[in-house]
Image: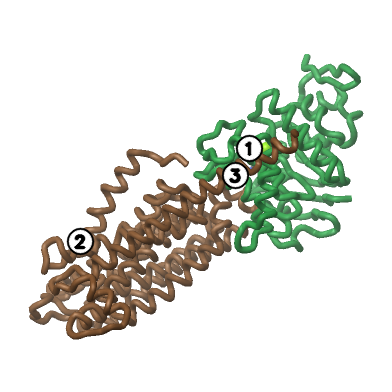
Amino acid sequence: MILSVNGLKFKYPGRRVLQDIDFSVEKGDCLAILGTNGVGKSTLLKCINRILKPQSGAVYIQEDEIFKLSRNELAQKVGYVAQKHESARLTVFDAVLLGRKPYIKWDASPKDMEVTRRVLKLMELEDYSLRYLDELSGGELQKVVIARALAQEPNILLLDEPTSNLDLKNQVEVIAIIKKVVKEQQIAAIVTMHDINLAIRFADKFIFLKNGTIFEAGGVEIITPENIEKVYSVPVAVEKFNNIPVVLPL
Amino acid sequence: MKQEVSAITNSHQTGLYQQYTGRKKFVILLLALLTAALSVIAINAGSMNVSPYQVFMTLFGQRSGISDVVIWNIRLPRVLAGIIAGAGLSVAGCVMQNNLRNPLASPSTLGISNAAAFGANIAIIVFGAGSVQSSSADAVIINNPYAVTASAFVWAMVGTLVILLLARLRGFSPEAMVLAGVAIGSLFSAGTILIQYFAQDVQVAAVVFWTFGDLGRASWKEVAIMASLVILSIAYFMLKRWDYNALDTGEETARGLGVNVEKVRLEGMFVASLITAVTVSFLGIIGFIGLVGPQIIRRIIGADHRFLIPGSALMGALLLLSSDTLARTVIAPVVLPVGAITSFLGAPLFLYLLARGYQKR
Ligand SMILES: Nc1ncnc2c1ncn2[C@@H]1O[C@H](COP(=O)(O)OP(=O)(O)O)[C@@H](O)[C@H]1O
Ligand SMILES: [Mg+2]
C-alpha cells in the first residue's frame, strides 16, 4: 500500500466539503476521482498534499503520516499539479528544473539536469526548453507543469484535471505517458477528470464523489448508467466499444 | 543510429541551455565591470583633482600626501557606501517584489523608510539632537548623528515588526503585508507632519536635511556595518533563490515543491526590511532604487532568481553610484541630494525598458 486516507474530514470556514473519506491506493494504480463541479475533488487532492489541513482523519504515505514529514520530504514523495497554473518569466527548462527543488541543496546537480532533460524529452517539450512560460498556450503550459511534477520523481502523482486544456492528441498522449510512468516505475497516480471516457481509458480504479463523500469506489465495473445518473443527475447509456465501456449522455 | 541522433539532440539542447545561462552570467559580469570602472571615475571626480594613477597607488597602499587623505577618508568610503547601499536597497526590493508578488513592493513603498524618517524626526525635534550652526559647508548641522541614526533604526524596525505582526493575522498573505505596509507608512508620515508642525523652523530644516539621502554621511565604520549586513543578506537570499523561483509559479505549487511559504516570506521580508532600516538610518532616504533596480534587471535577464538576485544588487549599486557621481559633479562644488538624481536617472531608463517590453531570451 502506497497511500491510505482514513476518515478524512475537511471544511472551509462555514462550508463543509469532505467527510468520511476512506480509501487506499496500491503501487501501479491509476485512480480517477470523479464527481460534479464543486464536490470537493480539488480539495481532496490538496488535503493529501498537506496544502490544506483536514479537521480530522489522517493520510499515510508508505506508512508515514503526512504531518510527520517535512514539506521537503513530502515533496520528494508527492508530485502535485494544481488545477490552475500561474505562468512566470521563467523558461520551460527552468520551470521543469524547479521540480528538482526538493532535492537541491545549494545548486542543481548533474543528476537534476539529467532528470530535467529526460522529462522534457518524455513530454516532447525539448523544442520549448528556452521558451518563456508567459509566452506559452494553455495546453503547452499544462504539459510543462505535468513535466515538473514528473521531475520530482515522486511515489505518488496528484493531478488536478491535467488534461483540461489539451487537444485530443495531447490528451491521449499525456495520459498514455503518465500511465506508462506509473506502471514502469510502480508509483501511483490520483487524477481528477471531467471527461469520464478519458478517465476510463486512463484509470483502473475509480471513486465517485457525491455530497462530499465517497458514493462508490471500485474498478471499471462501477461505471454503470445507474451510478453515473445518481452522481451527475444526467441519464446516460454505457455501451461497449472494443470491450471498453463508453459513456453516452442521452 | 537512433540512439546516436538522440544523443546529438541532447547535447545540442544542453549547449543551448548553457548558452542561455551564459548570456545572463555575461550581463552580470558586465554590470560588475561597469561598477568597478565607475568607482574609479567616482574616486577621481571632485573638487580636488587626483589622477587615476594616484587613485590606484593609494588603493594599493602606496600612500602619499594630501590626495591620500582625500581618497582614503572621504571619497573611498563614499563610493563604497554607494555601492553597498545601492546593492542592498535593490536586492531588498527584488525579494520584496517576489515575496509579496507585487511589482510595486519596495523599501520605500512599504512604509519602512517613512518609519525611519519618523524616528529621525523624533530624535532631532523632540530630543534636540539637531541644531543649526552657520558653517561654510552646510547650513545645517546635526549635533548628535548617532542618536538620530539609532532612533531612525529603532523606529524602522518597530514599523517592520508591526507590519509583520498585522500580516500574521492573515497568514502572511501578500495583500495583507502590502496593505499593512501602506497603512503603517501613512501613519508614520502623519506622525512626522504633526511633529514638524509644532517644531521650530531650524529643527524642521535640520530634519529635512536629514531626510535627503546623502552618501557623504558614511565613514568607514558605517560602511563596514552596512557591508557585513548586505553581504550576509545576499548570501541568505541566494540560499533561498530556488524557493523564490517556486513562489513565482504560485503559492500552492510552491508548497507542492516543498517550500514552507509562510516561513520563507516572513524571513525574506524581515531581512529585506533590516537592510532598508540600516541603510536609511545611516544615509537618509534614498528612494526609487529598490523599486526600479530589480525591475530594470528583470527586463534584461528574466525572473530567474539565480541571476536576478546578483543582477539586482549590481544594478542598484551602479544606479546609486552613477547618481551620486552626477550629484557631486553636475554643478560642483554644490552636491545635489542623491535621492533626486536617482529618480532623474532611473525613471527614464525604467520607462524606456517598460515601453520596449521584455528582452527575448
Ligand atoms: N478557499 C475556499 N474557501 C471557501 N470555499 C471554498 C474554497 N475553495 C473551494 N471552496 C468550495 O469548496 C467546494 C469544493 O471545491 P473544489 O474542491 O475546488 O471542487 P471540485 O470538485 O470542483 O474540484 C466548492 O463548493 C467550493 O466552492
Ligand atoms: Mg477542481
Mark 2 element type:
helix
Mark whose residue sits in front, 1 or 2:
1
Q: Could you say which disc has been placed on residue A181 in the image?
A: none
Cα separation between marks 3 and 1: 9 Å
Q: What element carries label 1?
A: helix
**Label 2 sits on residue:** B326
Pointer 3 residue:
A93
User: In the figure, B53 relative to A118: above or below?
Assistant: below
Which of the chains bears the disc numbered 1?
Answer: A
Q: In this view, does B58 lie to the left or right of B309?
A: left
Which amino acid type is shown beneath numbered disc 3? Phe
Quadrant (top left/top right/bottom left/bottom right) for the C terminus of chain A:
top right
* Left or right of residue A165, residue B206 in this image: left
Q: Can residue B256 be seen in this view?
A: no
The chain letter of the brown chain reads: B
**Residue B116: image x %, image y %?**
33, 70
What is the x, y in percent for residue B295?
Answer: 39, 50
Estimate the x, y position of residue B222 in percent, counting from the top left: 33, 79
Residue displayed at 69% across by 23% down: A168
Total marks shown come to 3
Q: Quadrant of residue B150?
A: bottom left
- Label 1 and label 2 in one chain: no
Whether labels 3 and 1 belong to a single chain: the reply is yes
- Crowdedness of circle 3 by 10 Å Cα count: few (<14), some, many (20+)? many
- Of the pair A19 and A186, the residue shown nearer to us: A186
The part of the image, by quadrant, that contains residue A136 is top right
Q: Please, which residue is most extreme toward the top here?
A: A250
Q: Earlier in the sequence, mark 3 or mark 1?
A: 3
Amino acid of disc 1: Glu
